[in-house]
Image: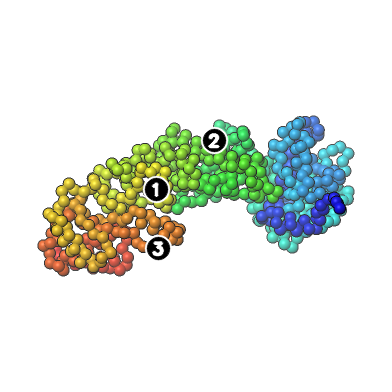
Amino acid sequence: MKKEGQIRVDSENLFPIIKKWLYSDKDIFLREIVANGCDAIKKYQSLCTIGEAENDNIVPRIDIVLDKDEKTLTVSDNGLGMTEEEVEKYITQVAFSGAQEFIEKYSDKTNAETGIIGHFGLGFYSAYMIADTVEIDTLSYQKDASPVHWSSDGTRTYVITDGERTDKGTSVIMHFSEEGMEFCDEFKLRNIIKKYCHFMPYEIYFSCVQSEKSEDDKTEEKPVNITKPLWLKAPKDCTTEEYEDFYREVFPDINLPLFWIHLNVDYPFNLKGILYFPKQTDKLQVMPGEIKLFSNQVYIADNIKEVVPEFLMLLKGVIDCPDLPLNVSRSFLQNDGEVAKISKHITKKVADKLVSVFKNERKEYESYWDDISPFIKFGCIKDDKFYDRMKDIILFKTVNDEFKTFSELPKTEDNKVYYVSDMNAQAQYVKIFKDNGIDAIILEHNIDTHFVTYLEYKESEIKFVRIDSEVDEALKSDEDSTDTETDSEKLIEIFKNALGTDKLEIKTQSLKTEGTPAIITINEYQRRINDMNKLYGDMFGANNDKAQETLIINTANSIVKKLDSFDEEKQGLICRHIYDLAVLSQRKLSAAELEGFISRSVDVMELI
């Protein structure tokens, strides 16, 4: 037996789904209703262009009116309006897209698709997220059209009657439900308008109606949005002042951006936007950015990772891409190969801009480096192709205050690159290196621990070594100041007895810097693991054991040479003091260590 039929969707079952699941945030309702108004205006303008409608030369606008007494919110446009037949077709058939039908009908006569926002036909029903009853007053642009009034309480029934509207366009009147009363608030609505409608293409006016009004109260008669955002202009027509003003308009940042990239792509997809490189206020942590995504000047969301790669989210900016394949709620992207292409193109444009600044404005690029280096390093770690583009313009600042590219790095004969992670804590080591004509680079940001490991993976011939992890051959004296191996072993034994520990590794070495009695070196690999664990909670090892420290006793130092002439008590005092000085060049002393150091310092002075 074979039986065919049509699947029926009951509106009573559909409305709860729309209210609860279709949109991620309730406040999106205003975006959807205002976007519908923009579409109505755009459609009317398109019809005028091809002679299908008579242009009345009325300035297009959208009015949003909050009536606190009536507990209603009304959104009105002066677009093409609707006839009774169109109301039944577009409003009463859930998910029927009037915008899509319009595009298909006139695509061969005009560029109607450009600027048309809605495609899904569900936007109107978002009103029921905050309203229990919604009315429509509309009058079509067509000659001899009659005004129409439509009303529904969100069930399967609706009522259509004669309307009273006298000018073309549509008004949507939303009666707040009990759950939607939070939106019956002027301040809240202004924030929602700024968030979702700030750059919509037609002037939007907002007013609040109250029964009791003081003499000072006046209806605000200026638009609350910017209809022609800066990203729509050609880059050659934009001034530095305009870019900076736009940045202040969009982002609450007291600092001006360092520089920016103006995206203006027409092929193979439509993409416009401005990406700003913000000034980093924290030199240790990577400060998160914010990239706002738009579609035809309608705000979609912040930091959508499918479009904007994770590392680009350290920037601030806006991207408007009408070609994005959004889902019906316009909140999320559908999986689409075009999205990956858009993302790759944005990354390429950013890389091209950085390379251009480096080649044409090297000094400016160097002045930006402290702020942009975390972004570039993070990008390299996350995207190998980005690294390939950036490799030749990555800078390294040296302890001699010079900037070097990767190919210019100061390397030892065995391709070691020495670096400093804290110029203050490692000041003694920096001085020793400088005194002996050895250069090192500065890597003080938290991301640098990851970055040097990444560089060693990509460039296997290079090894990065922190300045305090080993004694470079260039620091060693040509002659060992201990007469024999036995003398060296005796000196080590003196220090072990004085310090009372077997865990500390002690070695002797004659250094060119005679004024330093001892230094401490730390195992590079273990220290990196510990640094990672501090950041990520023991992800990179089973424990947080302290990295292996080695005390290097400088046998060329005059105090060390005299140790054998002191009695055992004085030897112990001097050895512990030498060790304290070496530790101080590495880190802060603990409270107990500091107390002991101060006490021993007094004892040492009494020897004078």
- Residue found 30% across the figure and 43% down from its top: 414
In this view, the residue in front, 497 or 354, is 497
Q: Which residue appears farthest toward the left when viewing the image?
A: 565
In the shown orientation, is residue 274 left or right of residue 521? right
- Image location (x, y in percent) of residue 334: 65, 47
Amino acid type, mark 3: Asn
- Quadrant of res 599: bottom left
In this view, 186 is above or below 351: below
Which label sits on residue 452?
1
In this view, the residue in front, 273 or 576, is 576
Dot 3: element: loop
Q: CA distance from mark 1 to mark 2?
A: 39 Å
Alpha-carbon neighbours of circle 3 within 10 Å: few (<14), some, or many (≥20)? few
Asked if the residues shown at circle 1 and circle 3 are in contact, with their CB atoms under 8 angstroms apart, the answer is no
Q: Which residue appears farthest toward the front when viewing the image?
A: 1
Which label sits on residue 239?
2
Dot 1: element: helix
What is the basis of the colouring in this image? rainbow
- Image location (x, y in percent) of residue 215: 71, 54
- Image location (x, y in percent) of residue 225: 65, 45
